[in-house]
Image (spheres, helix red, strand yellow):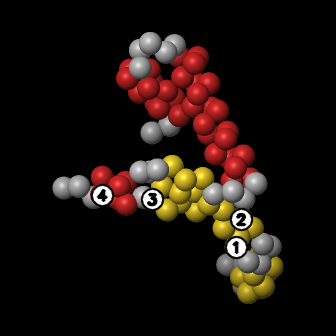
Amino acid sequence: MVKSEIVKQLRKNYPALNLSQIETIVNITFDTIANSLAKHKPVELRNFGRFSVKTIKAKYNARNPKTGEIIYVPEKKKVSFKMSKHLKQEINKK
């Protein structure tokens, strides 16, 4: 599901709000999550999950698959997501 589909779904569920209000709410929500992660602050959404930033160490032993030469891979950051128990149960319902 992409952001436009989320907006359409919210519009269907909450017809009192107009489309621009819903788009603004969704954009503010995503921007707030992104800004918090950029500041290395975890974001926890109850009954959904937790987003956090993890640092991947620099590597000196990576290889270029084409030439086989050893290359340096600098330190980088990635976003990690851990789902809540509630979401895990919802996904695994049969």
Which of the two discs, 3 and 2, labels the residue nearer the N terminus?
2
Q: Which residue is depicted at the point 47% across and 32% down?
A: 6
Q: Which residue is depicted at the point 53% across and 16% down?
A: 19
Give the alpha-carbon distance from disc 3 to disc 4, as whole Å.
10 Å
Q: Is residue 90 left or right of residue 21?
A: left
Q: Amino acid at mark 1?
A: Ile
Which of the two discs, 3 and 4, labels the residue nearer the N terminus?
3
Q: Residue 38 location in percent, x, y? A: 74, 53
Q: Which residue is depicted at the point 57% across and 18% down?
A: 21
In the rendered image, which residue does mark 2 sit on? 77
SS class, disc 4:
helix
Q: Is residue 51 left or right of residue 65?
A: left
SS class, disc 2:
strand
Query: Which is closer to the viewer, label 4 or label 1?
Result: 4
Q: Residue 28 location in percent, x, y? A: 64, 33
In the rendered image, which residue does mark 4 sit on? 89
Which of the two discs, 1 and 3, labels the residue nearer the N terminus?
1
Which of the two discs, 1 and 2, labels the residue nearer the N terminus?
1
Disc sitting over residue 56 in the figure = 1
Give the alpha-carbon distance from disc 3 to disc 2, as whole Å.
20 Å
